[in-house]
Image (tube, rainbow, N blue to C red):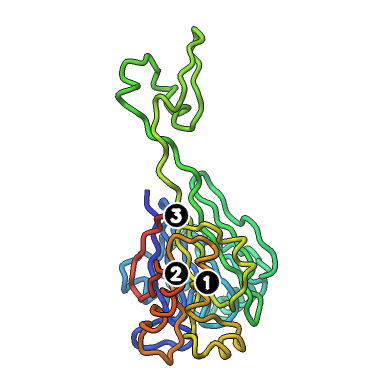
Amino acid sequence: MSFSVTILGSGGAIPTARRNPSSQYVQCNDRHILIDCAEGTQMQLRRFGIKLQKIQHILITHLHGDHYFGLVGLISTMHLLGRNQGLTIYGPPELEEIVRRQLELGKARLEFDIKFVQLDGKSHGLIYEDRLIEIHYFPLRHRIPTNGYVIKEKIKERKLNSEAIKHSGLKLEQLPMLKSGKDVVSEDGKIFHFHDYTFPPPPSGSYAYCSDTMYWEPILAHVKNVSLLYHEATFVENEKDRAEATFHSTASQAAEIALKANAGKLILGHFSARYENAEQHLVEAKKVFENTVAAEDGEKIDVIR
């Protein structure tokens, strides 16, 4: 089992030679998730050795082009490569019409189904769940309705204590119950307490993605105590007024959210093309929240607490 984030695009609206616009690939316990899909995302996936056909879920934050212009191209390539498994896309209500209309005009006949889940950018809730993970969405504060996302591992199974089990008389079919944190009662009434025969489970990780947004404290309710937080940091502090006017954030404001959320680690991203690098962003953020890194295209970051 593993949980990691690969940065496919760390820049703002305008692509540069160094940074593609927003997109990330998340692998969580063999669940494969794409967050945002800027132009060129499929090239970034290939460049960094990620198999397009593994992607099961695509989370789109909002309808500014630097977050979804690569979507139809990616879908078309999946089709040309013979995809036959369904794909679920989450995002604003208008996204389905945009995608289906482009495919229709191009006479594309996909061999796989696409399911769209509409999110209004105002509410919050659970949008996906299986036995290992959950995906939640919540509103951000931007010029148009925008969603943030949190991907969480569920509580993991406890680890068996093989030495304690060896001469206990426990049967093989009883072990899963112990691993799930439940006591076992034998036929003769003996109680096997799960904590005597198992070790605590490894910690579960969580990843929060806050794309385009101004500094907005209501976010905190949804990202509290996450293992890893991505928060946009389009500008540095001397352009704080421009950040506010365009509903974006500075690096220090992103760090303030991380600090107040008690996040384990912060990733800065969505850097304006006016900056040659993110050195000043890091300097300013680290004054507020030390455990901060700047996103770089191609970087893979483990989600750990």
Q: Residue 256 carries which label?
A: 1
Q: Distance between the residues labelled 1 and 3?
A: 31 Å
Q: What type is the residue that disc 1 sits on?
A: Glu
Report which residue position mark 3 lands on.
31
Residue 13 in the image, given as x and y percentages of width and height: 49, 86
Say whether residue 40 is left or right of residue 145: left
Instruction: Give the SS element for disc 3.
Output: strand
Which of the 4 quarters of the picture holds residue 42?
A: bottom left
Contact? badges 1 and 2 (CB < 8 Å):
yes
Q: How far apart are marks 1 and 2 (CA)?
A: 7 Å
Q: Residue at x 59, y 65 (%)?
A: 90
Q: Which residue is drawn at 38% across and 82% down?
A: 278
Q: Earlier in the sequence, mark 3 or mark 2?
A: 3
Report which residue position mark 2 lands on.
289
Q: Is residue 117 above or below residue 37?
A: above
* Crowdedness near tag 2: few (<14), some (14–19) or many (≥20) residues, C-alpha within 10 Å: many
